[in-house]
Amino acid sequence: MALASAIHLYFGGFGFPEPIAMRAFHLLAFVPPIFLLWPARAVRPDPTPGRFGAVSRYARAPSATDRPTILDWLWFLAAAAPHAWVWLYADAVSDRMEYVDPFSPVMVVMAVLAIATLLEATRRAVEPGLAWMVVISLAYMQWGHLLPGVLNTRVFTPAEILEASWLVPTAGGVYGPLTGIVATTIAVFIIFGAFMAGSGTGRLFSNLGAAAAGRYSGGPAKVAVVTSGLFGTMSGSSVSNVITTGAMTIPLMKRIGYPAAVAGGIEAAASVGGAIMPPVMGAAAFVMAEITNIPYGQIVVAAAIGAVLYYFAILAAVHFEAKRRGISAMDPADIPPWREVLADAHLAIPMGLLVHLMMERFSGNFAAFWATIAMVAVATLRRRTRMTPRAIFDSLVNAGLTMAPLAVAIAGAGIVVSALTATGMVVAFGGIIKDLAGGSLPLLLLLLAITVLVLGMGLPTTPSYIIAAAIGVPQLIAMGVDVLPAHLFIFYFAVLADATPPVAAAAFAAASVAKSPPTITSLHATRFGIAGFTVGFAFIYDPGVMLRGDLPAIIADTAVQVAALTAITAAWAAYFLAPMGPAARTLLGAAGLVAAFAHVVPSPLRLAIVVAAMGVVWFTGRATAPARTAT
């Protein structure tokens, strides 16, 4: 794992081999080890990090104690064979004409091995739901011609199915462009995140969160929000965020008065937002850049205000909840002094370098390479952060443990996308959604949001986004929506699926830490992450939140969202400037929903509506305060 990560890092700085060779090396490096690190008998939905602290989407940790069996070693060899074959014959594979040159018997055997081992690796290290979706996609290609109506497809031969699923580098499948972007840019960013963690940047984030927010009402909850947002820049995994920061913040929240389910919901919502937090957003953002041909730096800029709004809403909800429950700040003894924070402040320099290089339009892998080198160099400035050879080795191993499940998840998503494209199901399913919407953009958006949330029940964020984007983005573009807002809309709901019931990976992980009911915890996570829903629609209707338009328009659109989220979170917590009764909650909540979703109304008027409602609630509260006191 360490060697494979080091080679990926080298390629990021000095150039990659030919695409087929690079993808083959990537899959050869990270798919076979899954069968040794995730033995079949060790698969368990347990949110306990493994030997090096790595966890996948559902926290299926590599086992430090369960030894691989002979069967696991056979799986290892079977998984290595097809990728080693492609690597050895990379030139011949690159030169062959897809669907024209014969698909030889050797290729058939290698394709069967590649797909079968990928399914088992997905089941072990990622999520069985994704493996089943791949199986259903393959079955649809085989027997779709027997189905009636829009589901009917042409007849595919077994060789065509295997070729489309495995070896069509320009379109999809295991060796498609999605695997290419993971093997290059995303891999180097994962390595950078691992080095951030290994250098002590996590301690910087934790101390910064506590020092900045710990002294205020509901301090531990606000620390969880701030820390999880910062951790999201280096982990890219909502479950990893929950396990890493929640182990500290959830017990603190429970200790000072938050119910267990509420504490878990706060942590889950904050951890999910890490995937939308610039400058290092989740893997799906890099895939978005590849699909849209929009520079990653431009995507980061467009998503910046939305990410701030998301965390603002969580902080507002946490504040109102703390005020209503009378929850105080953290114990001063638990709050690190600012000198402790500043002792690690130099570790922020590599992140600044990363942002600078990306804004200067250097490639993402080149920027991440030099940021990683800078992290090792900057860490040597202080003894407490200096990375020993062991720390560097562990960081490379951690990066590999993170990349392995992602590699198989993306390859599986590639098979699904290939099947959807080859059978025409993308057009058919998109047509069904379009017909149901009846030409209404709001209804189309609602249907797509539901589709993405449903996909997110059984898929990690990145495959969910990829599949939903293939289905929904063409429909949005056909109705006049620009490419980037359409993709950001799908992306936000793919991220939110990790916190949305009935199946919510991050919320379930938080529930296990908080020892609370998973479904109730996920409901609280949804309400604390309400901004994800409003901002998702704002990308379509309020372009100012994407920094598009003139300055007054940007300010107006952002102000509407701030006011709307304040009103909605206050109404839900039953506290604004003072406790609120049912009438005040209804008025404030309705005004907030109008401001957030009534996009046919101009932004200034929507802002006026919610501000007026706040004024009414405030004056009414002041007028009734003496009466309440007298009684």
Image (cartoon, rainbow, N blue to C red):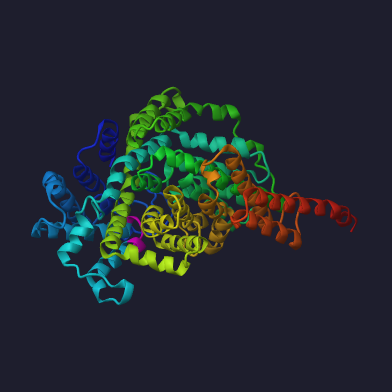
Q: Closest to the observer: 201 or 178?
A: 178
Q: Which residues are magenta?
A: 125-130
Q: Which residue is drawn at the image coordinates 15% and 58% (left, top)?
A: 99
Q: Position of residue 356 (x, y in %)?
A: 43, 29
Q: Quadrant of the C terminus?
A: bottom right
Q: Which residue is drawn at the image coordinates 43% and 65% (left, top)?
A: 434
Q: Position of residue 268 (x, y in %)?
A: 52, 52
Image side of residue 419 versus residue 612, left or right: left
Q: Quadrant of the N terminus?
A: top left
Q: Position of residue 519 (x, y in %)?
A: 53, 64
Depicted 251 relative to depicted 196: above or below: below
> Could you tell me what secondary structure mostly forms the magenta stretch?
helix
Image side of residue 113 versus residue 186, left or right: left
Q: Closest to the observer: 359 or 228?
A: 359
Q: Which residue is drawn at the image coordinates 12% and 57% (left, top)?
A: 100
Q: Closest to the observer: 53 or 145?
A: 145
Tell whether position 228 is magenta: no
Q: Which residue is drawn at the image coordinates 33% and 58% (left, top)?
A: 42
